[in-house]
Image (cartoon, helix red, strand yellow):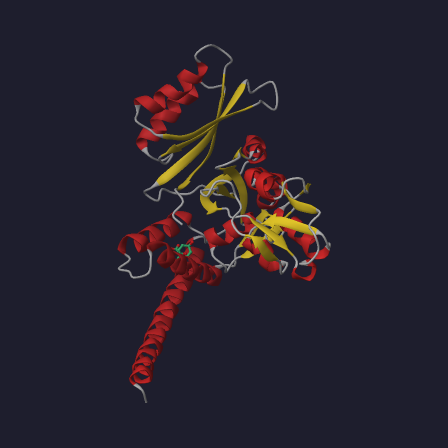
Amino acid sequence: MTDEKARLAELREQIDRIDRQIMDLISARARCAQEVANVKLAANPGQDVVFYRPEREAQVLRRIKDSNPGPLPDEEMARLFREIMSACLALEKPMHIAFLGPVGTFTQAAALKHFGHSVISVPLPAIDAVFREVESGAAHYGVVPVENSTEGMINHTLDMFMSSPLKICGEVQLRIHHHLLVSPKHRDEAITRIYSHQQSFAQCRQWLDTHRYGIERVTVSSNAEAARRAAEEPGAAAIAGDMAAELYGLEKLANCIEDRPDNTTRFLIIGRETVPPSGHDKSSILVSMRNKPGALYQLLEPFHRHGVSLTRIETRPSPSGTWAYVFYIDFEGHMEDDVIREVLSEVEAEAVELKRLGSYPIGVL
Ligand SMILES: O=C(O)C(=O)C[C@]1(C(=O)O)C=C[C@@H](O)C=C1
């Protein structure tokens, strides 16, 4: 045997031994999770038991990132543990996660990034359908887009919170990479039209104006639908992401064509329960103020005075006469924190209405 072969055989034997140890340890962890489920069931007989604990998952993933010895990057290590926890949770209870579909959208990618691949993901045709599916109890949680770094807020999601009783239980950010895709079957055809979602066209506008000027742009309901059409129609291309490309067997004519390299979309996890503090949390509220001078100042002043950082404030038109102005506000901290309780009670005293949308761990992955 050559030196190289002997050394490789030795290292592979070592890897096999380590794999057996990893498997034993993962199995021991999974048995612990099963036991956790038994404890939860015994403590809540006959009730709806909550198996998914976002605050605990955030703590586990933060601890993994903080104590990772390398050489794997922190993000990679956290991703591996994300999947281990996902499989453990599925042993406790398989989670049904509704997302803005169809299959292959960035929202599905965000759902899998947040919950791991051991969930049952359920595509729905519209944002309000995702809310309804969770409200009715048909899905445990839902995932909807809320803002994009290039294109701004997704107002439909914000507006749903005005009427929905659902809570925000988490957030997840996804780097959005768009590609120009064609079917290998139609590779030699000249491209006469490009399909995509209106947001994706907006995120790739400069690239398209420079590289595919004059080609018809056809807006469809999702990137995945664009990919499906490109797979079927000669002369058609799509702008979509990796998941849709893979799903419909498309190849990339141009890679990462988004105008801004940091193009990111933030998604919200919606559910029926409130989430206890994880130690590094964010909260969201909807507030309507009376239509009078200084209303916005009055709303924001308590946050400033108590040193609470606002991470976002958006104004939305009122759906009815009752809400003169509606502000959607995100800030750091948990609603169970004393300082946040105080700020919210001061805001509430001046507001026409204050709706607490939830406190949730700041995205870890
Ligand atoms: O700690 C719990 O409550 C568990 O159910 C265990 C566990 C895990 O695998 O670590 C699994 C699912 C929860 O979402 C959080 C954590």
Screen quadrant of the N terminus? bottom left
- 229 to 167, vertically: above or below: below
Identify the residue shown where x is 47% and y is 57%.
116
- 136 lies above or below 45: above
| Rendered residue at 50%/46% (across/down) | 176
Question: Residue 261: percent from the left, percent from the top?
Answer: 46, 43
Compared with residue 21, is residue 211 higher up or lower down, i.e. above or below?
Answer: above
Nearer to us in this view, 259 or 27: 259
Q: Nearer the viewer, residue 358 or 254?
A: 254
Q: Is residue 143 left or right of residue 282?
A: right
Q: Position of residue 94 (x, y in %)?
A: 52, 59
Q: Residue at x 45, y 45 (%)?
A: 172
Q: Position of residue 87 (x, y in %)?
A: 46, 62
Looking at this rendering, what residue extends furthest in the right direction? Answer: 233
Q: Quadrant of residue 186?
A: bottom right
When the figure is inspected, residue 85 is found, relative to residue 226, above or below; the finding is below
Q: Residue 329, image x and y in percent?
A: 45, 29
Query: What residue appears at the point 59 percent right and 44 percent down from the top-left corner?
Result: 211
* Ligand number 1: quarter of image: bottom left
Q: Nearer the viewer, residue 10 or 218?
A: 218
Task: Report whether residue 211 is seen.
Answer: yes
- Judged left or right of residue 101, residue 46 is left
- In the picture, measured across the screen, residue 46 lies left or right of residue 76, that is right
Most distant residue in the bottom direction: 1
